[in-house]
Image (cartoon, rainbow, N blue to C red):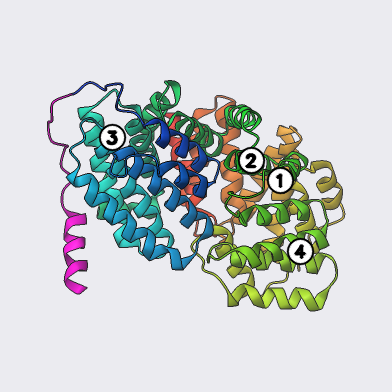
Amino acid sequence: MITTSANLYETLCAPLREPSQAPIELVAANDQLAPDARRAYAEVLKLRPEPARTLLRTASPTAAGTLLVADCADFTELMISQEATRYTKTIEAQNHRLELLAKSKERGPLPSYAAAELRLHQAAAQVTFGHEVQGAWNLRQTYLQMQAVVQRYPGFLPARKTLGLCQFFIGALPPGYRWFLKLLGLSSSTEAGLQNLGLAAQRPNDFQPEAQILLALIQESYYKKPGQASQLLTRLANQQPDNLLYSYLVISLNKRQHQTERALAAYRARPEGAGYLPLPYLHHMAADLLLYQGKYAAAEHANLLFLRQYHGQHYRKDAAFKLYLAAWLANDATAANRYRQQIDATGRTAVEEDAYAQRFYEDKLPLNRLLTRARLQIDGGYYREALATLRTFSPAAATPLRDQLEWPYRWARAYHGLGRLDSARLFYARTIALAGRAPYYFAPQAALQMGYLCQADGQVNLARVYFQKVLDSPKHEYKNSTDAKAKIALVELK
């Protein structure tokens, strides 16, 4: 084991080599999924792995397309269920498929593409289940193999989809992850990633919907352009009302865009029944939406349902924190204390929401009831109600610094949501000025939003100053995601 780890470290740190100069080959019509595999892949996209496996029984068992779609079914089931008992079995099946692909006599790009895609699935699974070094190795292999496929088959669009995804997210890694890039020996750019994703999204191919969704979500999350994602996901969900993945994406997008009623309507209309994977995280999202509306008993029920059905370790602390909020805001002190203790007793802190919940538990600084209610109202898109709540709170000299910072920040967010941008700027600036080097997320988030506002107004130099403030901010619970957005914004300003 020690020898293996040492060799792996040396391999990871080896200089990145250019792909071999293989001759460029044209993409033929048979470089597509076979009909059975294509139908099975459509079932996987609906989050129906068992019907997909049934369709694959009539396909050639060693064909590259069959092996790829079979792995998509296994990987999807593992990542959604988060069941540790599935992990080893999934990795073993991936290794067996990789051996078959290595021996394949199939011509064209599909075998090499399938092998690289399997490596990416394996990397994601390994990182999710705490095997970060092995995951880093497979991410490196994916990147190099996809580079080689694109170089040899420049017209094979699925490879551009995956290469573009890797290029974007490696290029978007915040400064705190420089050690990771050094370990991988990789460098990349978000612009190249977007270009490759765009090619795969614009032209027909077996994996075009994947590329379209990835590109739209990147534009929404990192470039403050939700229109494309909203139109695309609404259209896809309307075209395939039996597609649970599309329903999930519509719910998630509307939640992020503070459209609570639309998100809840999509949650209640989601497809259910035999063949679909259980998707417990939907109940966790619904619990948030119900908290925004002040429906605390319903929110508690939804999060308890999530915890009963969910087998993973992520979002458990966040769920316990939201259960605490529901009980605390409903004035049930006994239940609130019980849920607060659960924060420390369960889950991991790998995702930012869980880290925030754990910090709340460890700080032992009571939340302010009015500011908390205003925060939930703003997250739900109820901006006028949030302003009414904020008017009932007035900070004093004895008010904790955290609450003194949160108060102007919430005013800014409410005004921003209402389109009253001059007022939003005033309160964002007040938050930044008051914060100094305080280790809370309010000032970095305020600086990020000020940067976006200045960018929209054509104030490029001032936008650059605010985005740099984000990167220079002290460590806080949301630093990784906030820094990534600021880094991409600075690149875009160039």
Residue 278's image quarter? Answer: bottom right
How far is the residue under mark 4 from the one under mark 2?
A: 23 Å
Residue 200's image quarter? Answer: top left
Residue 8's image quarter? Answer: bottom left
Sequence-wise, the earlier of marks 4 and 3 is 3
> Disc 2 residue type?
Ser
Are the residues tagged 3 and 2 within 8 Å (C-beta)? no
Q: Which residue is mark 2?
A: 247
Are the residues tagged 4 and 2 within 8 Å (C-beta)? no
Q: Which residue is mark 4?
A: 300
Numbered disc in front, either 4 or 3: 3
How far is the residue under mark 4 from the one under mark 3?
A: 47 Å
Q: Which quadrant of the figure contains the C terminus?
A: top left
| Place of residue 459 in the rendered image (x, y in percent of width and height, measured from the top left) | 54, 27
Sequence-wise, the earlier of marks 1 and 4 is 1
Numbered disc in front, either 3 or 1: 3
User: Which region shows up in magenta?
Assistant: 1-24
For disc 1, the neighbor class at 10 Å (few under 14, some 14 to 19, many from 20) is some
> Is label 4 in a helix, a strand or a loop?
helix
The answer to whether residue 179 of the structure is visible from this angle is no
Say which mark, if any, is on residue 267.
1
Q: Is residue 397 magenta?
A: no
> Is label 2 in a helix, a strand or a loop?
helix
Numbered disc in front, either 1 or 4: 1
> Is label 3 in a helix, a strand or a loop?
helix
Sequence-wise, the earlier of marks 3 and 2 is 3
> Disc 1 residue type?
Tyr
How far is the residue under mark 3 from the one under mark 1?
A: 36 Å
Sequence-wise, the earlier of marks 2 and 1 is 2
Q: Which residue is mark 3?
A: 110
Q: Is residue 7 magenta?
A: yes
